[in-house]
Amino acid sequence: MYKYDVFVLGSGMAGMNIANICASKGLKVGITDELPYGGTCALRGCDPKKIMLGATEAKDFAARLHEKQIAEVPAIHWKAAMKLKQEFVDAMPPKIEKGYKHNGIETFHQSAKFISENQLQVGDKTIEAKKIVIATGARPRVLGISGVEYTLTSTDFLNFDTLPKSLVFIGGGYIAFEFAHMAARFGSEVTILHRGKQPLESFDPFIVEQLTGATQKLNIKVVLNTNVTAVEKFGDSFTVTGKDENGEQKWEAEAVINSAGRPPAIFDLDLKKANIAFSKRGVEVNEYLQSTTNSNIYAAGDAADTDGIPLTPVAVMEGHIVASNIINGNIKKPDYTAIPTVVFTLPTMASVGLSEEKATEKGIEFIVNKKAVPDWFTAKRINENTYAYKTLIEKETGKILGAHIIGPHAEEVINLFALAIKARLTSKDIKTMILTYPSASADIVYMV
């Protein structure tokens, strides 16, 4: 029997912060992860993806200014980009484990299952802990279709030795769009199949419309209102079958990527044996991120059923809160106000705050400012044809309620709107600011 004050399941950003903070306060801490230490963001998501996007950003910039200011569009090489990405990824797990051991945290590398309210089976070892934290993240949704075994995941995509010449993405979320843009610029023929009438359903329809147009200009096929029913293998290629209002359709590709969402990775943990309530959204927690049915348990990140968006910064925040509540008692609660989210396509799409639908549900009277502005200097100087915004402003107070942007540096500009919402700034406050010019940030004055 191995006994701990705190034992953490999952070594992503939430689990890592919880383990290190608790250990720094003198608690005896253990952690396990059946995958290499680091979690999705560092090893299979945000960071490696951004490294791979570097080459496509250079190509995109040169293509827009081709024959205007730049003589040639550079060739970009998948294998070279992959090598750079892998150097980063390979260095992370040993670095993280070294940090754990330096902090006195005992490390395990096996999957875990609950055997009682405060005990776990981790490999062939029995673990008992006063507090157990579930921070196991998310994993690709299992598709209920024939031939599901032929589909690959975003992790597989980021490990292709050679990029397939053609790809079909099942699902029209941010993973599909980000990787489709990347693959198309590296030379692949790409199709996105989405069952709904609008891809990227959690984003503003007006802004998504702009992105869909830009995506189609990259010769990426975006097929909507289509339910995928089967994947078949024929030699070295695959055929994807889907149904729309006109009947059955088929698409052929060298690889098929499952990008149909990522549910929490909690369903193999035998949670019922520990009296842990859960839903398809994650472990049910109270306002302190503590299990509603077992006070020994906390959950954070994608594994927890909260109002937070499944993003790395949210997992980090929740990790700090869980650690504080374990150490000091339940005193801290998460604040999910004004959390920005980004789709790293080119152009980039970003959002923060309320949508029109949410603002209406809350009974708020608001003003909408929206416009496509490719003629603004920020876009004009780099020959970017996709630039648009929508902002929501409370009618009575003038406070910024929400902002939705697509265009140059949207991933940075959205942070200013996040600050504005968090600080409860009004449109007048923003309009009277003096900002650097010419800069993309300065455009916010005209968006409100």
Image (cartoon, helix red, strand yellow):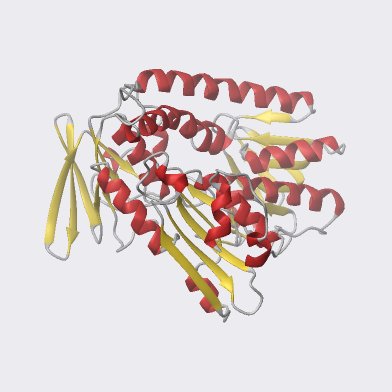
* Quarter of image, res 28: top right
* Quarter of image, res 164: top left
Q: Is residue 163 left or right of residue 373?
A: left
Residue 80 seen by the camera = yes
Q: Is residue 26 left or right of residue 131?
A: right
Exactly how many numbered labels are in the figure?
0
Q: Residue 288's spot in the image, x, y percent?
A: 74, 60
- The structure residue drawn at horizontal position 33% and vertical position 50%, both measured from the top left corner, is 143
Q: Is residue 373 above or below residue 167?
A: below
Q: Is residue 400 above or below residue 113?
A: below
Q: Is residue 276 left or right of residue 5?
A: left
Question: Between residues 198 and 320, which one lies in front from this camera angle?
Answer: 198
Q: Quadrant of the C terminus?
A: bottom right
Q: Quadrant of the N terminus?
A: top right
Residue 201 seen by the camera = no
Question: Between residues 159 and 392, which one lies in front from this camera angle?
Answer: 392
Q: Is residue 176 above or below residue 39?
A: below
* Quarter of image, res 398: bottom right
Q: Residue 139's spot in the image, x, y percent?
A: 47, 45
Q: Residue 378's spot in the image, x, y percent?
A: 47, 45
Q: Residue 379's spot in the image, x, y percent?
A: 42, 45
